Image: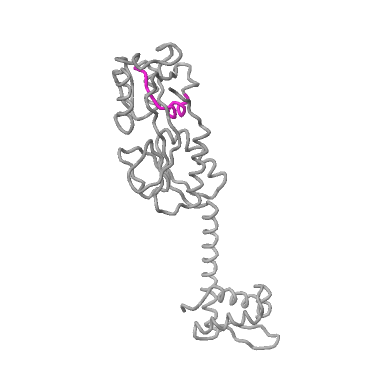
Amino acid sequence: MKDVELRHLAAMVAIAEEGSFGRAAVRLGYTQSTVSQQIAALERALGGPVFDRPGGPRPVRLTPLGSVVLDRGRTLLADADALARAVERFRAGDGRIDIGTFQSVSTVILPSIVRRLRAEHPGCDIRLSEEEPEQPQIGDLDLLFYDGPIDGDVESRKLLDDPYLLVAAKGTFPDGPVTLSRLDGVPMVAWPLTCDQPEMEQALARGGARPQVVFRSAINDTLLSMVRAGLGSAVLPWLAIRGADVASDDRLRVHELRPSPPPREIYLHWPAGRTRSPLAAHAVEIAVQVAAELAPPVTD
């Protein structure tokens, strides 16, 4: 049975449906002798005939063995055709992609990537997971967005610098940039002390700003609600501010900081040494394009 090939089964199906070797050859685009050779090879592999050949104008007929083989052969050919179509769709980008993300990227960058992927590859399967652990691992993910480099066997592409800005209730500070020293001792709401937050707060301290943190939350909308309520101001990355559409809120004002703390760095990571699918490779290209189009403000 190991010598049975799909082309042998295809020839058998064509003969059974056409009723003759000659018409099957025309249908398949082969010579009649080629079709005969394929059936002979099939019968040798099976150890018996699959057709009775009455000769003359009478159609060939399946033998009992041929009936069994034809039924299973059609199934195998259908499976092979389905496999070929699946591989073709995969190569065209209609596979599955698993992406790890975090809050700001999920709100601002990822929607554009998902829209473009779905528009170009309607059959693709996109799976997203959102978290921002202290020590992220690429694991089984195809792509991972993270605000900084990560350890492990990964390749990376820096997408953009994400500058920190001050968000305050209207009238808290005069319009324009705010010096860090103005934040010393003032009430602030902030992210928990994970990821880049400690480095950012240390940068504020080096600039003479030791604000009084009165509330911490990892949810951007919650922090901004507290800013609107007057509990305190917030220093947040530009992506978080853009994602919350702060510019459209008359109750809030966004100020650049002088001197500006070092920006948060947004990276896209993928496993090193692992062949990327066409869909994952295209997602990287789109992510780079989207990040370039965002063009966050340049602060100094």
The relative height of residue 44 versus residue 292 in the rendered view (above or below) is below
Residue name at image x 50 percent, y 40 percent = 113
Q: Is residue 235 magenta?
A: yes
Q: Position of residue 42 (x, y in %)?
A: 54, 81
Q: Position of residue 17 (x, y in %)?
A: 63, 75
Q: In the image, 135: left or right of 38?
A: left
Q: How many marks?
A: 0
Task: Please state the extent of the stretch shown in magenta in the rendering.
Answer: 231-245
Q: Quadrant of the C terminus?
A: top left
The one of 51 and 200 positioned closer to us in this rendering: 200
Q: What's the image's color scheme?
A: one colour
The one of 80 and 284 positioned closer to us in this rendering: 284
The relative height of residue 64 versus residue 268 in the rendered view (above or below) is below
**Quadrant assignment, res 74:** bottom right
Q: In the image, 170: left or right of 207?
A: right
Question: Residue furthest toward the right?
Answer: 57
Residue name at image x 43 percent, y 20 percent = 256
Q: Is residue 173 magenta?
A: no
The relative height of residue 244 versus residue 125 in the rendered view (above or below) is above
Q: Position of residue 152 (x, y in %)?
A: 33, 46
Q: Position of residue 168 (x, y in %)?
A: 40, 17
The one of 38 and 299 positioned closer to us in this rendering: 299
Residue name at image x 41 percent, y 22 percent = 165
**Quadrant assignment, res 267:** top left
